[in-house]
Amino acid sequence: MRYFYANTDTPFQYLTCGILQSQSGFLHQRRSFDVNVLILVREGTLYIAQNKNEYSVHAGEYVILPAGEEHFGFQASDGELSYFWVHFLVGRNAQLKTMQSASFDLHRNSLAETNDSTVMVPEYSILFNGRQAEIQVNQILALSHNEQLFNAEILDYAVSLLILYLAQDFAESAQDETIQIPHSVTLIKEWVKANYSKPINVKSIAKEFCYHPDYLSLLFKKSTKQTMISY
């Protein structure tokens, strides 16, 4: 997993945003932009590849497509798909860096050692608290479509606030891991929150995350002290 280190001495630059909605069979075009793209899925699953990695981005999850890298859909969506997208550039005198590491602890330690003007955001992640991100996304959309209130600087700061929130959300999920809750269980908990209105059960969740149902039930109860059914 790659992580982006961004300096926030100056705000990010907002360019454009929107919502994609598809009934079924959406396949992302193969292309490369000279801007950064943030995609936050609201419903369904987006199958997208970049940098030799394939991501199945579900509702309540996001992916960042860095400027200059080719990305494309590796599989068509199998149902309704809706996602918010925003194009942005890093602020003046700021850089967007990436790093590779197999150790989560290294990332966490690196975050702790950075100064106050630097944030770390995963290339792909599930939102620990998706409600706040949704509120910020709706604010950006409203600002971008209100010509009377349109102000480029306001949108720059609105996008910066969204990126800062993603960094905070990641930090909070890291804290969850430090109390011995496996990251896989955290992902499952957030997936259940995002899909609780649909007919789901332990078997379907196990299939979604490639676990045997019995093993998943034991892992979840051991980690959270409650059964999946009660959760």
Image (spheres, helix red, strand yellow):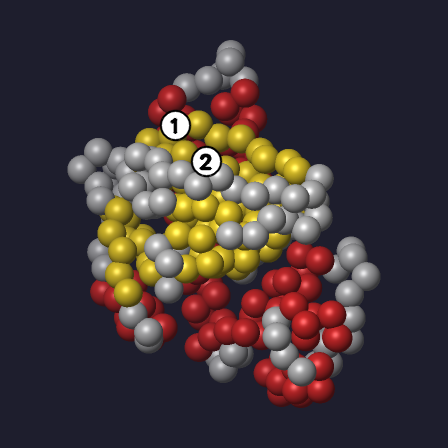
Residue positioned most to the top: 148
Q: Earlier in the sequence, mark 2 or mark 1?
A: 1
Across and down, in percent, residue 85 comes to 50, 37
Name the quadrant containing residue 87: top left
Task: Kindly check if marks 2 and 1 are in contact, taking CB atoms under 8 A apart as contact.
Answer: yes
The total number of labels drawn is 2
Can residue 167 be seen from the camera position used here? no
Across and down, in percent, residue 180 comes to 49, 82
Residue positioned most to the left: 93
The residue located at (44%, 41%) in the rendering is: 30
**Residue 157 vertical placement versus 145 (above, below):** below
The residue located at (29%, 41%) in the rendering is: 68
The residue located at (33%, 74%) in the rendering is: 102
What's under tag 1, amino acid-wise?
Leu
Q: Nearer the viewer, residue 81 or 134?
A: 81
Determine crowd level at label 2: few under 14, some 14-19, many 20+ residues with C-alpha closer than 10 A: many
Across and down, in percent, residue 32 comes to 36, 39
Across and down, in percent, residue 208 comes to 65, 68
Q: Nearer the viewer, residue 33 or 188?
A: 33
The residue labelled by disc 2 is 86
Q: Where, quadrant-wise, is the N terminus in this rendering?
A: bottom left
Determine the secondary structure under disc 1: strand
Would residue 31 be found to the left or right of residue 101 on screen?
Answer: right
**Residue 221 vertical placement versus 115 (above, below):** below
- Circle on res. 37: none
The residue labelled by disc 1 is 15
What's under tag 2, amino acid-wise?
Val
Q: Nearer the viewer, residue 35 or 195?
A: 35
**Residue 93 vertical placement versus 155 (above, below):** below
Q: Where, quadrant-wise, is the C terminus in this rendering?
A: bottom right
The residue located at (61%, 52%) in the rendering is: 45
Determine the secondary structure under disc 2: strand
